[in-house]
Each structure stands twice: as structure tokens, then as C-alpha cells.
Image: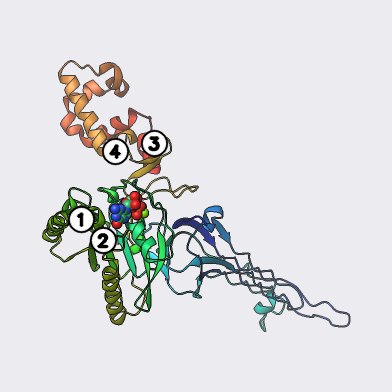
Amino acid sequence: MKFLDQAKVYLKSGDGGPGAVAFRREKFIEFGGPDGGDGGRGGDVVFEVVDGLNTLIDYRYKQHFKAPRGHHGMGANRNGARGADVVLRVPVGTQILDEDQETVLLDLTEAGQRVVFLKGGDGGFGNAHYKTPTNRAPRKCHPGWPGQERWVWLRLKLIADAGLVGLPNAGKSTFLAATTAAKPKIADYPFTTLTPNLGVVRAGGEEFVMADIPGLIEGAHEGHGLGDRFLGHVERTRILLHLIDGTADDVAGAYRTIRTELEAYGGNLADKPEIIGLNKADALLDEEIAGKKAALEAESGAEVMVLSGATGQGVQQVLYRLLTAIKESKAAEPGIINAPATRSIPRPPVGQKMAEETEDGLVWDEELGDWVEVDQGAAGGSPAAADDLEDDLDDADLEDGDLDETDIDEDGAGDAGSDDEDESGDDDGDADGASGHDGDGEGKHGDGR
Ligand SMILES: Nc1nc2c(ncn2[C@@H]2O[C@H](COP(=O)(O)OP(=O)(O)OP(=O)(O)O)[C@@H](O)[C@H]2O)c(=O)[nH]1
Ligand SMILES: [Mg+2]
């Protein structure tokens, strides 16, 4: 099954059904009175956490979820039926984020959990409800209350006890394959792993879950390589195993690169306990091991374990360390590790389009296939652009105006205005700036932004 860990969906709960206006009509019963029933409630939007699911792939194919409205009321005091609920089944570890991708609205961490996220609107009253001693034949009913609607992001953060981090090719997947039954892809080129893998480690009669994520490179927090968004999958782990390729020349540099990325990612990652492993020891001479271990220890200020995922050397000791730390952490904090909302470089998930513009002033450029900054100058009406233009115009006037044909002509009064440019002030400047692009500038730009 394909892996997808974020999706944007539209949710709407059902509107309430309208009440009815009806009167009892029966032979020999005069003035039977109002008997319009109430409308039914609209359906709710419900999240249900299911076991055995570890992807949000279903939400790539269907992104709009609308619960049906409540049925209308009817005569003879019959109330409308309520609308059916819409149930979204999500994997354990899914967070529901607001459109800003920062506010966590729901954190679904337990299998079987069921949360009503949007309530359906209440049904309206029928006319039977409105009868009073003074108005015994009301022709009034309520149309029902609307449901709620909103766009939300679903973000899956896998739940594992230990997480593997490191540069590409550090041997993370090899380590996972050696210690668990998982069969991740392993190859001697960077970015072999494209999506996270989970495996269950059995050590010393106990088990824990380990997560292998794609490698990080320098600048991952700016979107380089595969970016840092897969780091979300180790946010809930209790400990990180940081593997360093021993065959690399600069092991200290490799360690530093990853630490920088962990810090840049934010959340709780940089503060997580970490075990440092100098990997691929089988391919190194003893003196190389000693030198590189010392370099790493000097850089990190912590103990460095030497191992080889390929031959199994030192692996048991690492597992034992991991298990001990996990047990300690579980004793101190039995619940699932809280994962704060972290925002990585927004990228539209495959097959989905994101909002036109992000808060950072970035727009998605279809052709470039990347986020680009909004060109403030092109927007025309921005004060900075207007000021620049004003300066240009002033300069041009003083120097007998190269710009005359282009911009100053349009002002008409440009030359006259230049005499008292200081008094005429910013307002003119703004108007000029806008008029360069479209005559009625301000209002238009105001709407546009
Ligand atoms: N000699 C030796 N080679 C290893 C060891 N562990 C991994 N390798 C080799 O290193 C290469 C990369 O291993 P992977 O396990 O795919 O590395 P990774 O960290 O998962 O890489 P990405 O998924 O690209 O981030 C493969 O060719 C492995 O055979 C080891 O302990 N010793
Ligand atoms: Mg890998």
C-alpha cells in the first residue's frame, strides 16, 4: 500500500432538516390543530482511529466529505430522520491540523478512538412547536440550523519507540533489516528509502518499535533532498539512534549536519535522548575506528558506540541500550509522547493542490514545480515600489528626464508636480505608482492582496 502522510480534506457536517407546517385534517374533527413535526439533525463528521492502517493514502483519492442533511419533518407530528454520519478512518498517530498547518485540533493516538469533529446542524421546529394559547394555528416553522464546514490537514506521525536518523547511506535501513523482520530497500546510493519503515525489534524477551526514515542532508529544513518532513515520524519516539557512516572522511561533520537539521526542525527532536553509532565498523581498520570514534566523541561530547549493521558487530549492545532507555522513558511517561505541531516546508502532496499563497508570502509555481516568493514589485501598489518609482521620477526630472516618454507622460502633471514634490507627498507618489500599471490602482490592489 502506498504511503502518504499528509492530506488536505474538506469536511462538512449535515444541515438540520426543516420543520413542517401541517394541520390535522380528519373527518368530524374540526380545528385539528397544528401537527407539523421537527426536522432531523444533520449527520456528524467523525474521526475513527483504526488499527492496522499506516497511511493516509485513501485521502488522496477522496478529499471532500459531506454528511447528509437531516430529513424534514412531516404532518401527523412525524419528526424527520437524522442524517447519517460520515466516518473518516485514520491510522493511529494522525493529527488533525487547522488550515494553517500549525494548530493541532485533534491528536488521535489510540486505536478505537472515535471523535465527533463537526456536529451536524439541529433540525428546525415544526409548527406544532409554535402553538400557544393565543396562536393556536401557527403557520411558522424553522428551516433548521446549518452544519459546520472547514478544510483541515490530516498529518500522520507514526508511533515508534526508537527512531533512526542519519545522512543518506549511513546504513539505517540495513540496521532495521538486521534487527527486525522489516524488509526495507537497501542500496549503495543516497535516498534509497523514500518513505518511513517500521519494524518490531525483539531483544531480551521484550519488544519495541523502530522507525527508519529517509536520510537527511544539509539544508533539509529548507527543502533540500527529501526535506525534513519525514522527521515528524520520529517526533513521538522516546530515543533516537543516530548512525554515522564510518567510511566517510568527516564523521564529525556528518554528525554536526544532522544535529543542525534536528535543531532547525524544532519540535522536541533536538532534546530527545540520542545514541550515537559509528556504523560500518567492518569496513574500517582498528586505528581508523579509534580515530573516528575520538573525533565523534569530541564533537558530540557523548559516548559513541561502534557497530556494523552488516555483520552484526556491536548491534546487540546498541539494542540493549535502546531498550533500557525506552523502558526508563516508559516508566517516567507511560502515555504516547506528545508531538507538537511542527511546520515543515509546505509542499503540495502528490495529486493535491494547495492554497494559492502561504503565510510566508510564497506561491506555488506550477512550471518551476517549487515555491517562489511573491514579487512585491510586480504587485505594483506596494509602498516600497511606489517610493522607488517616485525617486526615479524625481531623478529623471532633474536630469532632463530619460523616463519622460514612459512614465511621466501618463501623469500629465508630473513636471508641474516636480516643483513641489516634497509638499505633494506620498499620496501622489502612490497614485503615480499604481497608475503605471492600471489606472484605478488602489482599490483593485487592496482586493488583490
Ligand atoms: N560495510 C558495510 N556496509 C554497510 C553497512 N551498513 C550498510 N552498508 C551499506 O551501505 C549502503 C547504504 O545502506 P542503507 O541501509 O541503504 O543506508 P540508508 O541509511 O538506509 O540510506 P538511505 O535510505 O538512502 O538514507 C548499502 O550499500 C549497504 O550495503 C555496514 O555495516 N557495513
Ligand atoms: Mg534507507
In this rendering, would 169 be left or right of 105?
A: left
Q: Position of residue 292 (x, y in %)?
A: 15, 55
Q: Residue under circle 2?
A: 242
Q: Nearer the viewer, mark 3 or mark 1?
A: 1
* Disc 3 to disc 1, C-alpha distance: 33 Å
- The quarter of the picture where residue 161 lies is bottom left
Identify which amino acid the numbered label 2 is placed on. Answer: His
Residue topped by disc 3: 368
Question: Label 2, label 4: how many angstroms apart (C-alpha)?
Answer: 48 Å
Q: Is residue 142 left or right of residue 253?
A: right
Query: Which residue is the site of mark 1?
Result: 255
Q: CB under 8 Å between callouts 2 and 1?
A: yes
Q: Classify 10 Å Cα crowding around label 3: few (below 14), some (14-19), many (20 and above).
A: few
Of labels 1 and 4, the one closer to you: 1
Q: Nearer the viewer, mark 3 or mark 4?
A: 3
Q: Amino acid at mark 4?
A: Ser
Residue 447, how many percent across, how many down? 40, 43
Q: Are marks 2 and 4 in contact (CB under 8 Å)?
A: no
Who comes first in sequence, dot 1 or dot 4? 1
Residue 442 at what x, y percent from top left? 35, 38
Q: Which mark is on residue 184?
A: none
Gap in angstroms between the C-alphas marked 2 and 3: 34 Å
Please give the label number shown on residue 382: 4
Q: Is residue 228 at least partly visible in the picture?
A: no
Disc 1 to disc 4, C-alpha distance: 44 Å
Of the numbered discs 3 and 1, the one sitting upstream in the chain is 1
Placement of 115 over or under 403, stated as above or below = below
**Residue shown at 67% from the left, 71% from the top:** 19
Q: Looking at the picture, how far across and down is residue 381, in whole percent?
A: 31, 36
Q: Residue 133 versus residue 229: which sits nearer the camera?
A: 229
